[in-house]
């Protein structure tokens, strides 16, 4: 059964999410602060984590960063704040979706399903470009049989580019589809991740081509 961890210091929020999740056929677990959440993640694999930002002991951003080092589980961030910075920072940490309080429990369930289905749909697909191998199900990248360390979002971006190889993709398109965020403004988020990807890919760095005045494409 699909298992969800609900992390929020407000008991009523946990209760509402738990009730709707169980009605939708999910098994649930709860944590009331960031420290408890990390202990549970170390002991159990979850298919999705619903994570509040403002919590005692450890905030949601810190939990997300440490959690991704333990298990690359999908994360939906909850917050009473609507600041653009919070959303961008969360997506850069590898958050899959962002929901602002107060929220519709039914909408949250729909978002949970999308995030989980997206991970499952990756299947056992492996993309090979010479010595560059992208294991989508294993969430790993190797260059000439050497594993390359990347952040979850760098892997997401590389997978997206590789799956759409030889197609010019705008920065806005990448933000919308990889970060799941309709963001108008600075493109530094995409450019920074592209820079890190090129560095990590070594001799395959030229697979990521800059499309002047637009964005990037993957050529192989």
Image: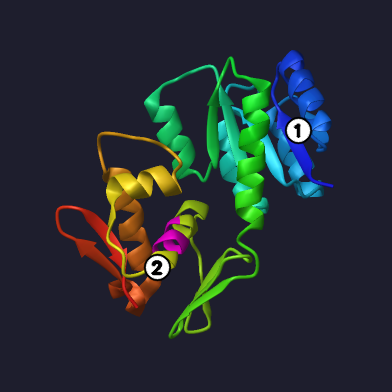
Q: Is residue 198 above or below residue 153?
A: below
Tell me the residue that label 1 is attached to: 36
Segment tinted magenta in the rendering:
157-161
64 drawn magenta: no
Q: Quadrant of residue 124?
A: bottom right
Q: Residue at x 60, y 19 (%)?
A: 103
Q: Give percent across and percent down for residue 73.
A: 65, 48
Q: Earlier in the sequence, mark 1 or mark 2?
A: 1
**Is 9 placed left or right of 213 in the picture?**
right
Residue 23, placed above or below residue 218: above
Main secondary structure of the magenta stretch: helix
Q: Residue 104's image quarter?
A: top right
Report how many numbered discs are placed on residues in the image.
Answer: 2
Which residue position is annotated with label 2?
200
Q: Is residue 16 visible?
A: yes
Q: Considering depth in this image, is 180 or 205 the residue closer to the camera?
A: 180
Q: What is the number of the mark on residue 143?
A: none
């Amino acid at each position: 059964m699909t298992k969800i961890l609900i992390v929020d210091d407000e008991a009523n929020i946990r209760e509402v999410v738990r009730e709707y999740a169980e009605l939708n056929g999910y098994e649930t677990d709860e944590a009331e602060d960031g420290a408890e959440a990390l202990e549970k993640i170390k002991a159990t694999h979850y298919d999705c984590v619903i994570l509040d930002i403002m919590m005692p002991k450890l905030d949601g951003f810190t939990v997300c960063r440490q959690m991704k080092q333990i298990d690359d589980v999908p994360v939906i961030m909850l917050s009473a704040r609507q600041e653009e910075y919070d959303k961008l920072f969360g997506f850069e940490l590898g958050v899959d979706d962002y929901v602002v309080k107060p929220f519709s429990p039914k909408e949250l369930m729909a978002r949970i399903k999308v995030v989980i289905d997206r991970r499952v749909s990756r299947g056992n697909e492996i993309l090979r470009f010479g010595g560059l191998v992208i294991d989508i199900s294993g969430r790993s990248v190797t260059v000439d049989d050497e594993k390359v360390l990347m952040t979850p979002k760098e892997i997401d971006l590389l997978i997206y580019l590789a799956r759409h190889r030889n197609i010019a993709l705008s920065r806005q398109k990448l933000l919308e589809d990889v970060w799941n965020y309709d963001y108008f403004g600075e493109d530094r988020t995409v450019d920074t991740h592209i820079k890190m990807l090129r560095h990590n890919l070594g001799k395959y760095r030229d697979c990521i081509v800059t499309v002047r005045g637009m964005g990037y494409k993957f050529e192989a």
